[in-house]
Image (tube, rainbow, N blue to C red):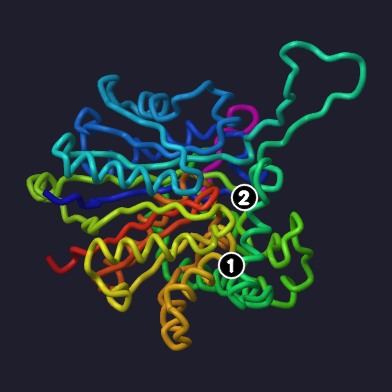
Amino acid sequence: MEAVIVTGVRTPFSKFGGALREMHSIDLGALVIAEAVRRAGLQPAEVDEVYYGATMPAELALQQNIPARQALLQAGLPPTTVSLTVDRACCSSTTAVQLAQQAILAGRARVVLAMGAENMSNVPLLLPGSRWGHRPGGLKLFDPIYEAGYPRYSKVACDAGEVALEHGITREMQDEWAVRSHHRYAAALEAGRFAEEIMPVPVPRPRGAVELFERDELPRPSTTLEALAKLPTVYGSPTVTAGNAPGLDAGAAAVVVMAEEEARRRSLRPLARIRCAVSVAIDHRRLAEAPAYAIRKALDVTGLSLEQLERIEINEAFAAVPLVSTKLLAEGDPALWERLKERTNVNGGAVAIGHPVGASGARLVLTLALELRRSGCRFGVAAICGGLGQADAIVLESLAGE
C-alpha cells in the first residue's frame, strides 16, 4: 500500500491588508476543499478524512473553532466525513499530508484531503481581561501577530538572523536570496507554471458586486538589491527585514492523497508518490536549521542520497532559512552548497509568493509535485520549519514515467 498525490489546488495568496483581508480563513478553506474534490473527479461522499492546518486561533475564534469541520460542511462534504484540525505552526499542513499518508498506509482510508488555510489580515486585536471589566484608565490591546513570535521566547526573526550570522550568512546574502525569489517567481509566472495550481477566488464587494481574485498579490518583480539594502531590520533582528521575509498573508491550499491502488482503479494518473513524511524538533532558537535536520531524517528513512533530490522546496519563513539549511546539508562543501541552492525553490518561494502559515506546507507539496512532473525530475523534497524549532520534510517521487 502506497500513498500518492493525485491533484491539488490553492487560492492566490493575498498580502497583508490585501484583496482577501475580510474573508475568513474557513471560507477560503471551503473553496479549496470543493475545488480539490472537483479536480479529482470525486463525489463529496468519497472523501474519507480531512486534515486541516490552521495556526491563528484568534482569527478562528471569530467563527468559534473546529475549522476543518466547518469548512468541509460548507464545501458540501457530508456530515459523516471525519476531520481533524492541526496546529504545528508553519508545519501544520505538511503534518496534514503526513497524517493523510498514515491513514492510507494503516488501511483506515483510501481518499484523504490534506490542506491548510490562514488569513493573517483577519486576525483581530485582543483585549485581555476585558470579560470581567476594567477600572478607570486606559485599555491595552494585544496584537497576536505582532513580532511574529512567542511572548515567552525570543523573537523568531532575531533567532533566524543570529543563527544565519553564526553560519556566515550575511544580511546581503539574505537580500540577494530575496531578490532571487521575486525574479524566479516572475519567470515562472511568465512561463505559466502557476496556472495549474491556482484557482480564482470570488471576493464580495459593496452593493452585491463580486470581484475575482486570480493572482498572487505579494510578488514584486522589480525588487532590487539596492532597494532591499535600504530597509531597516525588524524586531531587533541583526539581518531580517520586511524585504527578506514573507508577509503576513492569506490563502488556502489542498492536496488529494489516495491509496495508489485506488487512484489506478479510478484511472487517475497520480502526480507523485509520497516516499516518506517526517517531523523533527530541535532547540527553539535554531529554527533556521530545522529543515536541514528534517531532510536528513527523510533521507535516512528512504535510503536516498542528497544528490538524488533534484528539486528542493524549503519554505522561506525568512530568506535565512533555505540559506542556512542548504549550507548545513552541504557539510562544508562549497560546490555542493551551490548545487543545492540552485535546485532549491526554482520557481521562487514564500518571500515572493507569500506565507499564510497554516497553508504554506500544502502549497510547497503541491508546487513540488507539479514541478517534478513538469521538469522530468524523479525525486524532490518539501521542507518547512515551524514555531519553536519544529520542521517537516516530505519526499516525493514523480510518477510521470509510469
**Residue 143 picture location, percent across and down:** 72, 36
**Is there a contact, CB below 8 Å, between mark 2 and mark 1?**
no
Between 378 and 234, the residue placed more toward the observer is 234
* Residue that label 1 marks: 320
Q: Secondary structure at mark 1?
A: helix
| Dot 1 crowding, Cα within 10 Å, few <14, some 14–19, many 20+ | many
Q: Residue furthest right?
A: 137
Query: Could you tell whether 401 is left or right of 127 in the image?
Result: left
Query: Could you tell whether 87 is left or right of 179 in the image?
Result: left
* Residue that label 2 marks: 15
Between 57 and 223, the residue placed more toward the observer is 57
**Residue 147 picture location, percent across and down:** 70, 48
Q: Is residue 166 above or below residue 58?
A: below
Q: Residue at image x 23%, y 51%?
A: 6
Q: Is residue 126 above or below residue 52?
A: above
Q: Which residues are magenta?
A: 203-213
